[in-house]
Amino acid sequence: MAIRGEMLGLAVAAQKASRLMANLSSGIKNKLLLEMAMTLESAESQLRVENEKDLILAREHGMSSAMLDRLTLTAERIKGMATGLREVAALPDPVGEITGMWLRPNGIQVGRRRIPLGVIGIIYESRPNVTADAAGLCLKSGNAVILRGGSEAIHSNRTIGLMLQRVLKQFGLPQAALQVVTTSDRNAVTELLKLEEQIDLIIPRGGEGLIRFVAENSRIPVIKHYKGVCHTYVDAAADLKMAEDICLNAKVQRPEVCNALETLLIHRDCAAEFLPRIVHSMRKAGVELRGCEEAQKVVADLIPATEEDWHAEYLELILAVRIVESYEQAREHIENYSSLHTEVIVTNDYRLSQRFLHEINSSVVMVNASSRFSDGNQLGLGAEIGISTSKLHSFGPMGLEDLTTRKFIVLGDGQIRE
């Protein structure tokens, strides 16, 4: 009962604050975010001290290296949080935008105007930078936000939240517009998910288990993606040096993230040359490779791939490899195993690249680029609020516009309906 009352109190306060935030000018919101960026940068030492408390506990509990990496706040990542806030401040404000206006035969004018969603709940694991990223995007789009990070990052998240709240207070704005749930009681999430009258949208960020739990237990609409099984198809007409660079970057740069390469598809006409080359480069980088029967004929010591490998989001230095007979077979594989996250083709065949863009319906589809660019910041959205692989109401990396909806506005001069 105590947790239920606490979560309801947070949500009611956020709802009240959201009404004020919805009407802030772009200028005030931008100044607010810029001050928040300066505050985080100036508090680097304090943030790293608090983060180290989380890391010590995480190591004691045997957290995986991938999760430890997500949890760690380096000087570069703290600077990245501040940079993200500045980039969001520099973006056009979607609130108030008129997205269409038309004249009806009776003389009334009808249009649609962007408005904030209201109160956004973010439920996430490990990454404390999400606290700042989500806060920046929600506040710039005129929403209030309730942030519930994992217990493994409680010291980091609480500290970031308090720093950002102090800036809200400095601007005379309600601190309830940005609240961090500080209890580690797991029932807090369950209770938040029941508050459909106060919270307008839930965005879970983390492992598949967390996201499925949220989706199955929420009374509130949920924007989600379960996992990122990202494919790269190297076509017969590919520049093989380009393909090697793209695949290495996509798999090796940060293997623990959802836009990392998990399955590599290679056209048979270039496999004899490209597969040994990419195997050598991947192994040099510490990658374990699992190949289909055809791939094993080209490189004999590949670990045999199983059906489970085509479904796998490894989030580590493991890569599944399949040789395909044609573009059509590559497309069929992607359609069968895709998680609708990100797919890439490497080819110099313009017509084929356009077919790929047209026929593959994942949330991000790329030609001759690393899947690591499937990120709101890299795509020009500013800091990313999340990724949606469900098509309502957003698809792909989500930025400011995705945290708004549209209302109808009608302008008349006395018309009445007959």
Image (tube, rainbow, N blue to C red):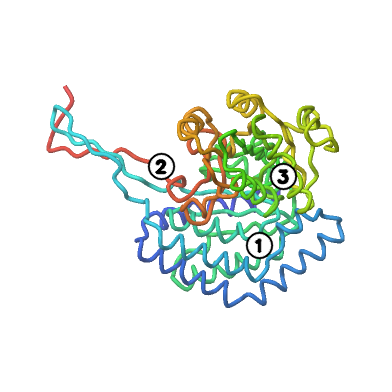
| Callouts 1 and 3 close, C-beta under 8 Å | no
Percent coordinates x, y for residue 13 in the rendering: 52, 55
Task: Decide: few, some or many residues near mark 3? Use Cα within 10 Å; few <14, some 14-19, many ≥20.
Answer: some
- Indicate the amino acid at tag 3: Arg
124 left or right of 178? right
Q: Is residue 216 above or below residue 47?
A: above
Q: Which residue is mark 2?
A: 405
Q: Number of callouts in the render?
A: 3
Query: Mark 3 and mark 2: span between their CA atoms?
Result: 49 Å
Quadrant of residue 161 in the image? bottom right
Q: Nearer the viewer, mark 3 or mark 2?
A: 3
Q: Secondary structure at mark 3?
A: helix
- Foreground pick, 29 / 83: 83
Residue that appears at 83% across and 37% down: 302
Q: Which residue is mark 3?
A: 277
Q: Secondary structure at mark 2?
A: strand
Percent coordinates x, y for residue 224 in the rendering: 59, 39
Percent coordinates x, y for residue 237 in the rendering: 56, 35
Q: Which residue is mark 1?
A: 157
Query: Mark 1 and mark 3: span between their CA atoms?
Result: 44 Å
- Indicate the amino acid at tag 1: Asn
Quadrant of residue 78 in the image? bottom right
Q: Is residue 105 above or below residue 77?
A: above
Task: Decide: few, some or many residues near mark 1? Use Cα within 10 Å; few <14, some 14-19, many ≥20.
Answer: many
Quadrant of residue 60 in the image? bottom right
- Indicate the amino acid at tag 2: Thr
277 left or right of 105? right
Residue that appears at 57% across and 78% down: 42
Mark 1 and mark 3 lie on one chain; the one further toward the N terminus is 1
Q: Is residue 46 above or below residue 67?
A: below
